[in-house]
Amino acid sequence: MTYLLDANVFIEAKNLYYGFDFCSAFWDWLIMQNEAKKVYSIERVETELQGQDDELSEWAAARGPGFFLRPSSTMPSALSSVAEWANGQNYDQSAVSTFLQVADYYLIAQALADGHSVVTRETPAGGSRKRIKIPGRVYRAGRPVRDPIRDAASGACPVHSVEP
């Protein structure tokens, strides 16, 4: 199984748990899992991370397209499916318009198109119709699966991850 990481996984790790100055094992583990073809993200997430102008931006820039996948040839139909879903969920039109412009839309579509699972730290919007959010779990085909980060973590620092 392969996993696509949302931007908030990287940002929260850097800001809250695994700063580059004291927990390089986490970042090394991500690179190793990417080399093992288990963990990726997408170029839209890379763009978000590069906008931070910090150590995380530098780390992301050093990874390139081997870590941050470019859209696949199967993306257009998946983008249509995700857009159709968003429009059919009774969200405010402004929420749908915003969603169709942000990385989450492309992350979900890439996962759908290529059979990946999404890993995110987002929490549900709590019934809000003003913002579409990815549920705060690891999902594959709409069902929660085991957390790859928690399952594989070992070494110098514990890994705080999404709810199982």
Image (cartoon, helix red, strand yellow):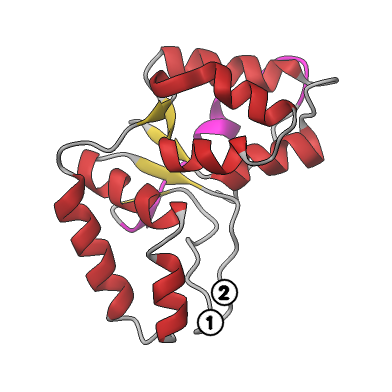
**Dot 1, how many residues are within 10 Å of its Cα: few (below 14), some (14-19), or many (20+)?**
some
Q: Amino acid at mark 2?
A: Ala
* Residue nearest the viewer, comparing 142 with 13: 13
State yes or no: discs 2 and 1 in contact (Cβ < 8 Å): yes
Residue appearing at x 52%, y 39% in the figure? 47
Mark sitting on residue 47: none
- Which secondary structure, mark 1? loop
Vertically, is 2 above or below 59? below
Residue appearing at x 50%, y 33% in the figure? 148
Disc on the earlier residue, 2 or 1: 2
Does 137 lie within the magenta span? no
Res 147 seen here: no
Pointer 2: what residue? Answer: 125
Instruction: Place residue 10 in its image quadrant.
Output: top right
Residue most toward the right?
22
Res 112 seen here: yes
Vertically, is 50 above or below 22? below
Residue 16, image x and y in percent? 80, 41
Does 152 lie within the magenta span? yes
Q: Amino acid at mark 1?
A: Lys
**Dot 2, how many residues are within 10 Å of its Cα: few (below 14), some (14-19), or many (20+)?**
some
* CA distance separating discs 2 and 1: 8 Å
Q: Is residue 37 left or right of residue 131?
A: left
Pointer 1: what residue? Answer: 130
Range of the magenta residues? 142-157
Q: Choose mark 2 or mark 1, whichever is in front.
A: 1
